[in-house]
Image: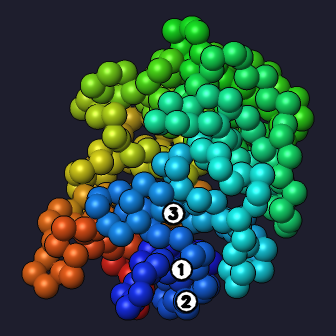
Amino acid sequence: MFWLLGDAPCKNPVCTSIVRTTDGGASFVGLPAPTAPLDTGSGGSGGSGGVNTIRFANALDGYVFGSNQEGPFWETHDGGELWTQPSAISGQGLLSFGTGAGYAFALVGTCPGGSCSNISLLRSPVSSDEWSPLNLPVPAGASIGAGMAVSGADVWVSLSASQPKQMLLASDDSGSTWTTYTSPCLSGLGGNLQATSASVLWAVCPTGMLAGLMRSTDGGANWQALTTATPLPNSVLLAPSSGTDAVLASAGQEQLELTTDGGTTWQKVSSPVTNGYWAWIGFTNASTGSALSSASSAPAGWPWPNGPLPEQLWRTSDAGTNWTGPLSIG
C-alpha cells in the first residue's frame, strides 16, 4: 500500500489530489485531499506556500506538508477521509518530519526569510493530535543542518552550530533522552540524513560545489567516507534500502548506481528513463521502492508549458536493480 500526492485537472483551484493503491500500483483510488495548493517548485499554481509531501505511518494515520519551511501541515487519522491542521505546528516552519515506534516527530523553527532559529522538536502519537515539545538540547544560535532521521525508537537531529562540523543529537528512546555526537556534515552547508536501522545511517553532505557520501554503522558515533567513481553534485539523490544497499542518482540525470556492500563499490544499473531525470527515489523496505522521473521538457500538447513537467512513477522489488513502469495512475 502506498499513496501519491499530486494535482488533477479541475475547474476551480485548489486542484491538489491524493490517490492510494493497495496492490502495488496495479490500480489506484482517489481520496479527499487537504484544501491546500500544491507546491510544484517550478512555477505551478501552489508556489512556496503549498504542500508537496505525503507520508503515512500506517493505513489510517497520515501527513501532508510542504518541505520548504513555509507550507502548511495537515494530518489524518481515518485513512485520508478527513484532514485537519494541528495548532501546535501551524505558523512554524517545518524543517524535517519522521515517524517511528508509534510516534510522529516534527522538527520546527521560526524561519523568516529562510533563516531558521528557535528550533524545537515536537512529538505526537501517530493516532492522535497530541503534539508536545521534547527536551531537545539545542544550543543558542543553532540552525538547521542535515535534518532529522527516524528508525523505530531511534531519532537523530543534525544541527549547524558554532563549530566546523554540525552537531548530531541522538536518542534511542523516542526523544526522551539525548546523546551528542559530531555530524559528518559541515556547519552552514545543510545535508541529508537517512537511517535504515538503529545502527546504520547514511548521509549526503554538501562541501561547496560537490557533495560527499558518509555512512555510520554505530548509530552516528563514527562515520566513514564513501567513494564513488565520479564527483557528485550537491543535488545528488541517495536512497538507501538497507544497511548495505543503496541507490544513487545525480539529480537531473538518467543514470542510476547501486551499492550492495555499504558503499565500498558502486555499479551502474539499467535505467528505464530515456528522456528525463530522476526526481525522487525512496524505499519502504529492503527490497521494495518507488521513484519519480520528470521529463526534461514539456511534450506536445502538455497543458502547462510554463508549469510543472510531467512525471512518471516507477517501482522496484529487488532493491533497485530493476525498475518497472511507468505505472498508470489514471
User: Quadrant of the rendered structure where residue 80 is?
Assistant: bottom right
Q: Earlier in the sequence, mark 3 or mark 2?
A: 2
Q: Amino acid at mark 1?
A: Ile
How far apart are the two marked residues, 1 and 3, measured between alpha carbons? 12 Å
Name the disc covering residue 18, or none.
Answer: 1
Question: Residue, x 39% and y 27% (percent of image)?
Answer: 206
Name the disc covering residue 51, or none.
Answer: 3
User: Quadrant of the rendered structure where residue 329 is?
Assistant: bottom left
Residue 58 visible in the snapshot: no
Q: Of 185 and 217, which appears nearest the observer?
A: 185
Badge 2 element? strand
User: Quadrant of the rendered structure where residue 160 is?
Assistant: top right
In the image: residue 234, left or right of residue 128 = left
Question: Residue, x 84% and y 37% (percent of image)?
Answer: 134
Looking at the image, which residue sits at the far top?
A: 163
- Evaluate if marks 1 and 2 touch, with contact meaning CB atoms under 8 Å apart: yes
Residue of label 2: 30
Q: Earlier in the sequence, mark 1 or mark 2?
A: 1
- Against 53, residue 12 (above or below) is below
- Against 114, residue 255 (above or below) is below
Relative image position of residue 215 (x, y in whole percent) = 54, 30
Count all numbered tags in the image, as a single digit.
Answer: 3
How far apart are the two marked residues, 1 and 2, measured between alpha carbons? 6 Å
Q: Amino acid at mark 2?
A: Gly
Q: Of 40 and 88, which appears nearest the observer?
A: 88
